Image (cartoon, rainbow, N blue to C red):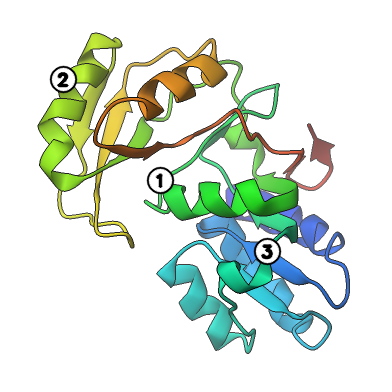
Amino acid sequence: MNDIEAGKRAAAERALALVEPGTVVGVGTGSTVRWFIEGLGRMRHDIAGAVSSSEASTTLLKQHGIEVLDLNAVGEVPLYVDGADECDGNRCLIKGGGAALTREKIIAACARQFVCIIDPGKRVEVLGRFPLPVEVIPMARSHVARRLVDLGGQPVWRQGVVTDNGNWILDVHHLHITDPVALEAEINQIVGVVTVGLFARRRADRVLVGADGEL
C-alpha cells in the first residue's frame, strides 16, 4: 500500500470511531470512502443502516451487507462521512470528482455532523487547484459554460459522464477561490446549474487528515 492509500485508510478508520451504535450513517463517495465502507461492514450489525450519496456507494454498501435506506424516510442523519478533492484551512471543500456532488450536498445538509476524511495531499491553502465540478442540466451546458467564463474560469465538459441524476458535469479550471461562500452562492444562481461542488456554506464540521491530523 502506498503512502496516499495509507493516509486514506487511516482517516477512514478514525471516522469509524465516531459511528454511534444503533444509528443511520450517511456515506459519501470516492476512494477514501471505500475504506470507510469496508470498515463499516465490520460494524453492520451495530448500526441501523446507511444513506448513500451515489449508486456506486450503494452497491458497495450492499456488498458489505449494510442496509441502504431512503433519506426521505430517515430525516436528520447523525453522522455523514465523505471525502474531498480539496480542503482549505477553514474546512471548505471542493467535491465532485466522482460526479456525486448533488447527492453529497443533500446528505450534508441533513447531517448533524459532517466529517470529511482526506489524505494529507488534499490540503491546500486556497481552493481551485483541483478543477471545480458543476452539475448542469444538459440543455443548459453551453449557457452555464459562458457564465463560468465570465467568472474567470475555464469550463471543460466531462464528456461521457452522466450523473446519477441524469445530468452533465462541467469542470472549471484556473480558479483561485478566496471567497468560497460567495462563489458557491453565485454559481448556484446561474440558471441551469443543479449545484456546484463547493462545500462552503455547509462546510465540514471536522476534517480528519490521515493518521493524526485534524482541521
Which residue carries the number 1 mark? 97
Q: Quadrant of the C terminus?
A: top right
Q: Using the rendered view, name the quadrant where residue 210 is placed.
A: top right
Residue marked by disc 2: 146
Q: Does label 2 or label 3 sit earlier along the sequence?
A: 3
Q: Residue at x 54, y 12 (%)?
A: 179
Left or right: 160 with respect to 84?
Answer: left
Q: Residue at x 59, y 23 (%)?
A: 124
Q: Amino acid at mark 1?
A: Gly
Q: Secondary structure at mark 2?
A: helix
Residue 125's quadrant in the figure?
top right
Label disc, if present, on residue 8 of the rendered structure: none
Dot in front, 3 or 1: 3
Compute the Cα span from label 2 to label 3. Answer: 37 Å
Position of 177 with respect to 174 (left or right) is: right
Nearer the N terminus, badge 2 or badge 1? 1
Q: Real-space Cα distance between discs 3 and 1? A: 27 Å
Query: In the image, residue 201 lies at what x, y percent?
Result: 61, 28
Q: Is residue 18 left or right of residue 152?
A: right
- Counting from the top left corner in percent of width and height, residue 66 is at 64, 84
State whether residue 109 is above or below residue 56.
above
Q: Which residue position holds label 3?
A: 75
Q: Residues within 10 Å of mark 1 (few under 14, many from 20)?
A: some
Is 97 in front, or is 186? 186
